[in-house]
Amino acid sequence: MTSGLLLIDKPAGPTSHDVVAAVRRGAREKQVGHAGTLDPLATGLLVVCLGAATRLSEYLLGEDKGYLARVRFGQATTTYDAAGEVTRSSARLPERAEVEAALAAFRGPVQQRPPAFSAIKRGGRRAYDLARRGEAVDLAPRPVTIHALTLTDWAPPEGVLEVRCSAGTYIRSLAHDLGQALGCGAHLAGLRRTQSGHFEVSAARPLADWQAAFAAGGWQAEVWPMDAAVPGWLAVPLTAGDARRVQNGQAIPLTAAGHAFGRAYNAAGEFFAVLRADPAAGVWRPEKVLRV
């Protein structure tokens, strides 16, 4: 079994689930997951976890993301993107300076209302299922942080925004809300994810290339190691005895202060387990064992 990370440059069209299914078939691996959904119309970086690395996806999901967002001004839609029906049109388009001035209100910590057409559950059902049935969906605003927001290109009626934001930010909502603030309406016309945590899209390979590599063989050499998921964590080498204790769910002495998590390595130098620090007790507690 191969365990590690695949950096995939997703094309427009397939869902993130479609990409996972393609990797599952090509790699002949049952354990496959991704570290952050991309809508079908979006392209760019999708981090796919393979084998035991799927147990690390929760740490990747919470990382900041980077995007290039193409926003179409003068039209609002039901889905907040180009796939929806137009709900509002305006002949008046903002000037570039107006757009740049309006961006200031969206930087930093903000309360953002998710789109009605989203996978968020309400009453046990997906919001998009309710919206498609014509039911009113009013999702509560959520706290997100827009670390950086810049208008990098302006060709009316469209502009391109470069965004760096916290996990959970809806770029569709950002486009819609910006249109509301400018009084002309807007929707997301195109989206490309350029960054996920410390990974950049420049290091990713197109899905078609991965599929060709699966067919040709030898693709395992292109897989990123599991510890690439959490490079900032403290490396904790284990003795054979400590490795046995960790595998049995037992704590081991804390080796350094000031670290919430540790990457435990066995005597063979393999990333063996995730450790969580318990400073009060002076120990590392096993959180996930990745190898048996």
Image (cartoon, rainbow, N blue to C red):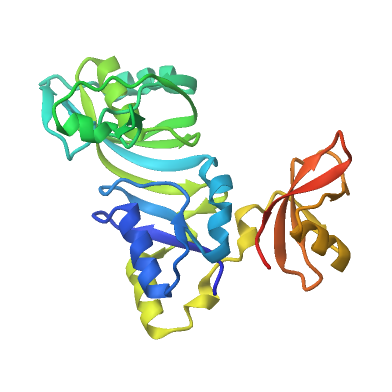
Residue 37: x %, y % from top left: 39, 46
Place residue 131 in its image quadrant: top left
Residue 141: x %, y % from top left: 39, 19
Nearest the eye: 130 or 36: 130
* Left or right of 239 in this view: 270: left
Give the residue drawn at x 29%, y 53%: 15
Residue 172: x %, y % from top left: 30, 33
Nearest the eye: 219 or 28: 28
Is 33 drawn above or below residue 205 in the view shown?
above
Is 189 drawn above or below residue 86 in the view shown?
below
Give the residue drawn at x 41%, y 37%: 162
Place residue 214 in its image quadrant: bottom left
- Figure quadrant of the C terminus: bottom right
Give the residue drawn at x 87%, y 37%: 281
On the question of residue 197 being in view, the answer is no
Give the residue drawn at x 30%, y 21%: 177
Nearest the eye: 118 or 248: 248
Is 110 drawn above or below residue 68 in the view shown?
above
On the question of residue 228 being in view, the answer is yes
